Amino acid sequence: MKNVLIYCFAIAFLFIATDLHAQSHLYQDPDAPIDERVEDLLDRMTVYEKIGQMTQLNISMINTTGAASDFTLDEEKTRYLIKNHHIGSFINGDAVAPETWFTFIDGLSRVGMEESRLGIPVIYGIDHMHGASYLAESTIFPHNINLGATFNPVHAYQTGWVTAYESADIGHRWGFAPTIDLGVNPLWARIWETYGEDPHLASVMGRNFVEGYQGNEEIAPFRVAATGKHFVAYSDPRTGWDRTPVQLSMQAIREFHLPPFQAAIDAGIKTMMLNSGEVNGIPVHASYEFITELLRDEMGFEGVVLTDWADIEKLVDLHRTAKNYKEAVYQAVTAGIDVSMTPLNLDFNHALKELVDEGRIPEERLDESVRRILRLKFELGLFEHPFPRNDRLYRIGTEENRLKALAAARESIVLLRNENDVLPARDPGLIVVAGMSANSKRNLNGGWTLTWAGGTEEQYPDDMHTIYTALKNEYPDAEVRLIEAELRSNANRELFNSADLIIYAGGEEPYAEFTGNVTDLTMPQEQLSDVEFLSEFDTPLALVLVQGRPRIFTSVSEKADAILFAGLPGFEGGEAIANIISGRVNPSGRLPISYPMYTGHFSTYNHKPSGVSSSAIYPFGHGLSYTEFVYSDLQLNSESMDKDGSLTASVTISNSGDVSGMESVLWYITNHVGRISRPVLELKHFEKIELEPGESTRLEFEIMPMKHISYPDRYGNRLLEASRITLSVGDLSQEFNIVD
Ligand code: BGC
């Protein structure tokens, strides 16, 4: 009898299960191939549902007050947008506690799953630029300009990895990083978001960020998507001001600006954000040539292309390439965008619907974009795991992660000058610290930290060090005095006279995007005169530059005994700077940009032979150490090779000083003949090593002409002439020939 009952239950269960299965759709089957799931779902969607998937709205559209810092989900507004307008993506916010984020995104995702007719999950996008920077309690790494200075790809990887680790669980599945624009214009207010001016450095760093972020398996069952931005040539506006026109030859774009984007594509980056500005007269958002022909057809990008903030609107009121919003939507969609970061209204949805109804944009064009968007959502596992989780929030801001950020910050500080070896300052009795960045947390972080243009001092964690508090910690037996006002008072003069070291930490206050536009790159006058004043004491003076771009200080550059380029080193920056001043850490950062000497005379290190050769006060790659590295015995295994050949170079590097240290070994080539003029120097390979005093190592670099020496013409054809090449590493160089 018991067996019969079990048998009956089993039959009944099978029947119900089969029936359930019959009711569910192919796209809901996690075991079905993604392509089939996408097609099945796409077939079931209406035109307006498809348009909703192509739309991204700001948090202010779904919270109660409309402020970016308001995390009370307004369910009515959210229901309306998801049920009636099928919105597929939301963005933005503020650095609130993990539980607050969790509750907010959990609520949003539940409305998404319940109210969208087909149960399509929403995806949340966020600007986590250097760690999960829109999340309180998270680990904050240095900004990209500092990561570039480390010349150590591990740190870009860790930044990506930790960002995913700390933010995927709370529902941040789409990170708007890495910025892989080239930092070639020192005036540009976003130069600190880049890895510097060199295409190879930016390619390696960007690729590693993508691998760390998208490849993090500890966040399973979740996955996240990185965004390469801002495609392309955003970073070199003629005026230096944000989003002003760029005039650049296609050859230069291909040779210098495309490689980091290509490297990110090759690393499997899932999304790209477009450059807001115009390039050669055409806003990138309206450029079929850039989006469809170049990025997709030629570079092979198959992922999702996202507009930047309100950029379709800007085609009307900024660039004026479209007479009204509907025409702007026509231009952008025809050019090839997939997702519109609209983000403050439903104009895109209405306009696109009209364009489809009128037959001006075929539904098949929407299908192309929606396929990519759905594929992204399937690949990230959002259909199976649409809700955030809060059972692993203890993984946010751990000591282990903090140490990764500290290691990156330490390697990112560049010692520009060190006359008479005034640093490290061992056993000082009295250190006096002054300057606007001496006791500031926000200045160490710059923009895109806690909020868009940088938080207030009070928003930073209590236990985050400033330079001053870190120095007190670093030197428990010394007196460390902070000068906050009246630098020139008699009492302070006495202190400066009797100190063993004066540290002046100047630089810039936080800014983001256009709020950082300046008309003069010179260091603010007040700071120049402070340095001048402090240099008059007999006490050694160390200048610490806490800033997002190279503010020009040539008039006082020789007045300071030591100079540290600190950039924007993040939460661990204070400690890293103190470690270097004390000698606990031997500096190993190298400049990822050319530090200009003159306000009217800029050029990158890889300028053309007829370009300016001496406009940098500190060149790209410059950076001192407390030890000495000696390069010797540079050998090539051949003196010539043909175009398809290869050649191996090797060199010995020895630490001939008294302390251990890290060294970035930078290999450059100079190609002496090119139909399109060749840069005087090109970084082709780098490696960071650590050597104990007296230790040596031998490194190799295999040179392949097509990979390392050929270059594109304006159509993208690779050119390579028979030519003489100089290979240089450290202070050594050797020549070889490429023969036909
Ligand atoms: C910036 C992007 C950013 C976006 C979303 C834009 O203004 O240019 O870099 O990802 O805003 O916040």
Image (cartoon, helix red, strand yellow):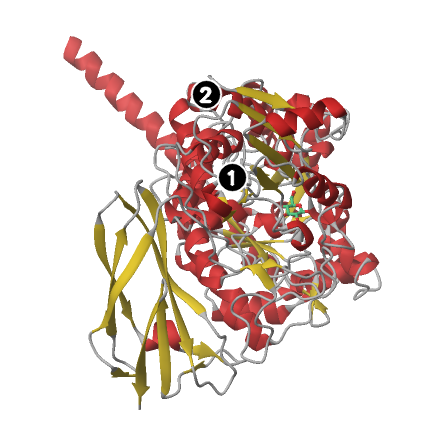
Relative image position of residue 644 (x, y in whole percent):
28, 81
Left or right of residue 249, residue 24 in this image: left
Quarter location, residue 536: top right
Depth check, front residue: 629 or 421: 421
Amino acid type for the residue under numbered disc 2 = Leu
> Between disc 1 and disc 2, whose residue precedes?
1
User: Up-down: is 701 above or below 56?
Assistant: below
User: Up-down: is 692 above or below 404?
Assistant: below
Residue drawn 46% across and 29% down? 166
Q: Nearer the viewer, mark 1 or mark 2?
A: 1
Relative image position of residue 25 (x, y in whole percent):
44, 40
Which part of the image, by quadrant, shows the N terminus? top left
Q: Is residue 298 visible?
A: yes
Assign a secondary structure to mark 2.
Answer: helix
Q: Which mark is residue 125?
A: none
Which part of the image, by quadrant, shows the C terminus? bottom left
Left or right of residue 512, residue 585 in this image: left
Amino acid type for the residue under numbered disc 1 = Pro
Assign a secondary structure to mark 1.
Answer: loop
For mark 1, does the 10 Å Cα neighbourhood hold few (<14), some (14 to 19), or many (20 or more) residues? many
Depth check, front residue: 703 or 42: 703
User: Up-down: is 81 above or below 358?
Assistant: above
Q: Disc 1 marks which residue? A: 142
Q: Disc 2 marks which residue? A: 393
Quarter location, residue 106: top right
Relative image position of residue 84 (x, y in whole percent):
70, 37
